[in-house]
Image (cartoon, rainbow, N blue to C red):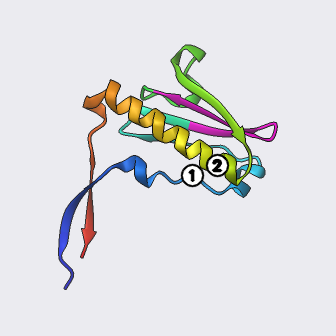
Amino acid sequence: MAEEKLVIRDRFLQFDIPPVNFFTQGNCYSGSSHSYFRYKVRPIDGCFVCDVWHNPKAFDCISEDDLEATERFPLNEDGRTEMLGWFEKRFAEFKEKYPEYAEKDYVRVKF
């Protein structure tokens, strides 16, 4: 019988953005980490347009003033890789600025 343990992992390292073809079909992707690190990826004019904000509101409910950062990357595999690195940097900044919201996630893993 498998033993179950609690494992601490950094949730953002498990961050999973859909593949490029998800976006080339016109789809948007959004998510959050610890409720206050929110992000959205939109395909606009051949680019990934990425937004980050730090509050529990949905993207449609925030104003331009709520956005912490916005960046554009080419809508291709290199751009996706660059985008993931950008999100990692933004999340590191978030953890420094809001340590009370940047706790580790606890995940049950069977060994």
**Residue type at mark 1?**
Ile
Question: With 40 as the anchor, is 9 left or right in this view?
Answer: left
Residue at 25 percent across and 73 percent down: it is 110
Kindly report which numbered mark, 2 or 1, lies closer to the viewer in this rendering. 2
Quarter of the image for the N terminus: give it. bottom left
Mark-to-mark CA distance, 2 and 1: 8 Å
Question: With 101 as the anchor, is 55 left or right in this view?
Answer: right
Question: With 72 as the anchor, is 103 left or right in this view?
Answer: left
Q: Which residues are magenta?
A: 40-53
Q: Is residue 55 above or below residue 105?
A: above
- Image quadrant in which you'd find residue 65: top right
Measuring from the top left, give residue 67's x and y in whole percent. Answer: 54, 22
Label 2 with label 1: CB-CB less than 8 Å = yes
**Residue type at mark 2?**
Arg
Residue at 76 percent across and 46 percent down: it is 26
Q: Residue furthest bottom?
A: 1
Residue at 58 percent across and 37 percent down: it is 40
Residue receiving disc 2: 80
Mark 2 is surrounded, within 10 Å at the Cα level, by few (under 14), some (14 to 19) or many (20 or more) other residues, namely some
Element type at marker 2? Answer: helix
- Image quadrant in which you'd find residue 7: bottom left
Measuring from the top left, give residue 31's x and y in whole percent. Answer: 50, 42
> Is 64 in the magenta?
no
Badge number at residue 17: 1
Q: Is residue 43 above or below residue 52?
A: below
Residue at 73 percent across and 51 percent down: it is 76
